Image (cartoon, rainbow, N blue to C red):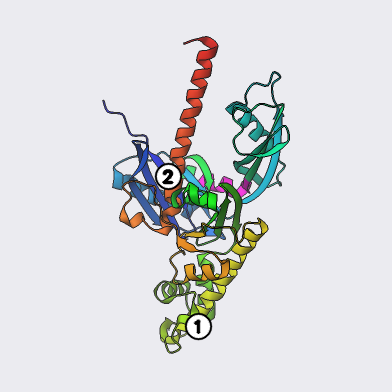
Amino acid sequence: MPKTPRYLVGLDLGTSQTRCVVGIEENSRVRCVSYGAAGSGGWRKGVIVDQDPVVQSIEQAVTEAEANGAMAVESAVVGVGATVESVTSRGGVMLPSGRPPIDRQALNTAVKAATRAQFGEDRMMLQAIPIDFAVDGQEGIRNPLGMTGRALEAQVRLLTASTQAHMNLTTVVNRAGLVVEETVFEPFAAALAAIGEQERQMGVAVVDLGAGSTDLVAYLEDNLRVAASIPVGGLHFIRDVSQVLRTPEAEAERLVEQFGSVLSESTADNSRVDIPAAGSEPGLRDASRRTLNEILQARAEELLFYIERELTRAGVAGQLIGGVVITGGLAKMTGLADLAERLLHTSTRLGLPAPLYDLPEELDEPSWTTANGLLLYAHRLRLHRQMERENMTEWLRSVFGS
């Protein structure tokens, strides 16, 4: 009887869209086998304020993925954003006498010691990412396996999230009938799909432009240097247009998609757009397309200012040879990559989900990069757990015999 495939699932919960990608492992690669998407609601500024519409959105996206792939989805790796912050922490352990070589267990113990930092009342640890190690005070060691010494210290970057926001997130996924395997900071997942080790070594930033917030990670010398969330997203652009041009948000969204650009100087002075009036105002009126794009450019410049500030705080501004990679639903806004190059003083490109095998053409989009990255993370998680089981089996054999 053939074995039931062990599906890998990435679930990207967004303010305006829920995306679900399903894959399986084949010959050490991840093959995409199905996907689903649904419009979302119940979010404000990147956090859940009404669970019911979020649950419905998850159910619709998962049901579509199940129908497309003739399968049942039971669990998923889920993306987290908006409330995530990062802090650097250190901790260490004394090594056994006799100076045996440092093994993986000693590394894990040192990393765990470094995670015992004190957080605020409403903060919880999301991920702990090792930066480097020190052996007997010698710092900056990337891989101390096999070395000897008396003391091992780890420096880690801790990603934390709002406990309440995280609890709401896991609750809606559980209510939709899924088990949460793990939660992952969304641009961290997007980086798995959009960039490679060489770029992380040279220095690169991944910017995930969502509807409710913009999330950011940056790497230099293959170390995570920045993990931050900025409370500006695509909905802010739409609401700016809605308020200034006095038109409903749905119409403002259409204007942004059809005519929007964040480079207002490239817009002809005499170009006009028709705008339905808001409220009790009758009929259509026209407005300058340049005015529309000036609104968008002002908000884009503000967002890029915040991104540059985060990069400067971390000391990596001007050092990102790999440039900036933009993902998310807003990434393809006309002129955004050019404006980012101008204001961030580095090359900028769209982040597409390259590593997946058999990826449908409609998923080869920046808006799907995070979901695909979450699928890749699910694969990594499974490999890690398998390795831990194998190591435990070897240890049991050494103690009790085969």
Give the residue displayed 50% in from the left and 19% down from the top: 394
Q: In this view, does 310 lie above or below 114?
A: below
Of residue 147 and residue 211, the one placed in the foreground of this image is 147
Give the residue displayed 59% in from the left and 35% down from the top: 143
> Circle 2 sits on which residue?
375
> Amino acid type of disc 2?
Leu
**Residue at the bottom extreme?**
270
Q: What element carries label 1?
A: helix
Residue 150 point in image, percent of width and height: 72, 26
Tell whether 334 sits left or right of 295: left
Asked which quadrant contains residue 230, the reply is: bottom right
Give the residue displayed 47% in from the left and 55% down from the top: 53
Residue 280 visible somewhere in the drawing: no
Asked which quadrant contains residue 366, the reply is: bottom left
Q: Does the magenta stretch include residue 162?
A: yes
Residue 300 point in image, percent of width and height: 54, 70
> Circle 1 sits on which residue?
291
Q: What stretch is highlighted in magenta?
A: 159-172
Tell whether 333 sits left or right of 104: left
Residue 83 point in image, percent of width and height: 60, 53
Mark 1 or mark 2, which is nearer the start of the sequence? Answer: 1
Residue 397 point in image, percent of width and height: 50, 14
Q: In this view, does 141 lie above or below 281?
A: above
- Packing grade of label 2 (10 A; few <14, some 14-19, many >=20) is many
**Residue at the top extreme?**
401
Q: Is residue 90 magenta?
A: no
Label number found at residue 3: none
Q: Is the magenta stretch mostly helix, strand or loop?
A: helix
